[in-house]
Amino acid sequence: MTISVTGATGGLGGRVARELSARGLEQRLIVRDPARAPQLPGAEVATASYEDSEAMARALDGTNTLFLVSGYEDPDRVSLHRKAIEGARLAGVERIVYTSFMGAAPDATFPYARDHGATEQAIRDAGISLTSMRNTLYADAAPRFVRPDGVIRAPAGHGRVAWVARADVARLAAVLLTEPGHEGQIYDVSGPHAIDLHETARILTKATRRAITYHAETLAEATESRAGHPDWLVDSWIGSYLMLDTGEGSVTSHTIEHLTGQRPMTLSEFLAAEPSSFAHLT
Ligand SMILES: NC(=O)c1ccc[n+]([C@@H]2O[C@H](COP(=O)([O-])OP(=O)(O)OC[C@H]3O[C@@H](n4cnc5c(N)ncnc54)[C@H](OP(=O)(O)O)[C@@H]3O)[C@@H](O)[C@H]2O)c1
């Protein structure tokens, strides 16, 4: 069975590739720039960009199972994903393990969750078996929510999130890619427990040793404080907080511990394990 991994030059795909390599498995890394591909035992490299379905099909030739990392923030991201999926279909890929988002659905509050729902559907429409990892917000991203003045300003109310570390998501992905029984399955993927942004700020304060607080913005404040950015990006940023307030992004799942046998890290444990994630705050 050939496993191919996209996004291997990035944070999540790179971790997944290292997990597979550490298990002694062979894999193919699909990258845009081979010079930046990680050098790993058992890994070969093929070059393709999601935009180019034919190049994706060539790069994926002989692949049974594909780890497909979602592309960068873009208003037309679903079209990009459709092209990558078309490449997988042309190559005869049987199953895609896709990095979706919690609450993925056509009517989700968070615009990216709507995009992920459309991408999941595109995989099914291509006749490819989908294993969906509906990840919540990455713990790795939490320090980036803090503004330079030490305040997290967001319209999340008292909404909660079970921050999940990419390292734990990657451990789960390795299981989903290599063990049987995950065809056609959808998994909510989260850290061990949900906390609100006041608690998040307290944990960041302790880790960074600088005062960090949370200010729950009104919708009007949230729009005003992000003025000057494109509307689609502002809608996405605001939506990422509103989905905590509605509870759509607050689900806590036992998927990682259940399927990997190891409890995922809390936000505190993640910050202790990866202090480089908050270096910009110290
Ligand atoms: N749950 C969350 O909180 C959260 C937060 C941030 C992002 N995300 C999503 O999760 C994904 C993975 O996260 P990450 O931390 O690994 O992101 P990352 O470090 O930015 O890596 C993204 C990877 O996707 C590749 N890529 C992007 N567009 C591509 C294209 N058109 N064709 C081929 N490859 C392409 C990049 O390749 P290059 O190196 O060539 O650019 C890179 O390897 C992100 O892309 C984003 O969709 C989720």
Image: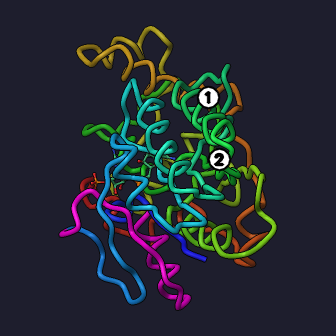
Residue at image point 28% right, 14% down: 227
> Which label sits in the foreground, 2 or 1?
2
Q: Residue at x 32, y 19 (%)?
A: 226
Residue at 58 percent of width and 68 percent of height: 168
Cβ of mark 1 under 8 Å from ligand 1: the answer is no
The answer to whether residue 259 is seen in the rendering is yes
Mark number, residue 134: 2
Magenta stretch in the rendered image? 11-35
Q: Which colour scheme is used?
A: rainbow
Secondary structure of residue under mark 1: helix
Residue 233 is inside the magenta segment: no
User: How many residues crowd around disc 2 within 10 Å: few (fewer than 14), some, or many (20 or more)?
Assistant: many
For label 1, count other residues whose C-alpha is less than 10 Å away and answer few (under 14), some (14-19) or many (20+).
Answer: many
Q: Indicate the secondary structure of the residue bearing disc 2.
A: strand
Q: Position of residue 126 (x, y in %)?
A: 63, 40
In the displayed structure, would residue 109 be above or below residue 67? above
Taking depth in this image into account, of 130 and 108 the one nearest to the observer is 130
Q: Determine the residue positioned at 71% across, 31% down.
A: 247
Relative to the observer, which residue lies in front, 140 or 87?
Answer: 87
**Residue 12, can we see it?**
no
* Residue nearest the observer in this picture, 24 or 213: 24
Query: Mark 1 belongs to which amino acid?
Result: Met
Occupied quadrant, residue 181: bottom right
269 up-or-down from 22: above or below: above
Q: Where is residue 136 in the image (x, y as percent from the top left)?
A: 60, 46
> Residue at label 1?
243
Q: Which of 217 and 183 is in front in this view?
A: 183
